[in-house]
């Protein structure tokens, strides 16, 4: 048996052979939990503000335009990319 066999996973490579990869363990779980709770809180806060703004409108809720959704999606992708860049070591940031 390999050392740390419980923490090692095998992922296929291009040649079809298996390459051992270490899992992050507790640190990874903590990151996922923190990200999930943070995402949930931001989603609920966004929903609250959206419904509050639509209820203040006398004409009722307005349909969301496609251009607004497209702009929001691009902004969200930019934010997600910046979050992913924060996880890289400082000497590897900003390289494509």
Image: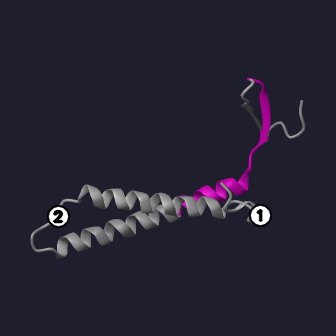
Residue 23 rendering spot, x and y as whole percentages: 74, 45
Q: Residue at x 23, y 58 (%)?
A: 65
Apparent side of residue 36 relative to residue 18 in the rendered image (left or right): left
The quarter of the picture where residue 16 lies is top right
Residue annotated with mark 1: 91
Crowding near the residue tagged with mark 2, few <14, some 14–19, many ≥20 C-alpha atoms within 10 Å: few
Label 2 or label 1, whichever lies nearer to me, is: 1
Q: Residue at x 15, y 74 (%)?
A: 57
Q: Residue at x 34, y 56 (%)?
A: 70
Q: How is the image coloured?
A: one colour
Apparent side of residue 45 relative to residue 77 in the rendered image (left or right): left
Q: Which residues are magenta?
A: 16-37
Residue sticking out furthest to the front: 96
Label count reads: 2
Q: Determine whether the residue tagged by mark 1 lies in a helix, strand or loop.
A: helix
The quarter of the picture where residue 34 lies is bottom right
Residue annotated with mark 2: 62
């Amino acid at each position: 048996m390999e050392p740390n066999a419980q923490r090692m996973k095998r992922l296929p490579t291009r040649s079809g052979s298996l390459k051992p990869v270490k899992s992050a363990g507790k640190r990874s779980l903590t990151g996922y939990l923190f990200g999930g709770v943070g995402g949930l809180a931001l989603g609920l806060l966004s929903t609250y503000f959206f419904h509050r703004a639509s209820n203040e409108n006398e004409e009722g809720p307005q349909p969301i335009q496609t251009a607004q959704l497209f702009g929001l999606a691009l902004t969200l992708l930019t934010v997600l990319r910046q979050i992913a860049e924060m996880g890289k070591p400082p000497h590897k940031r900003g390289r494509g």
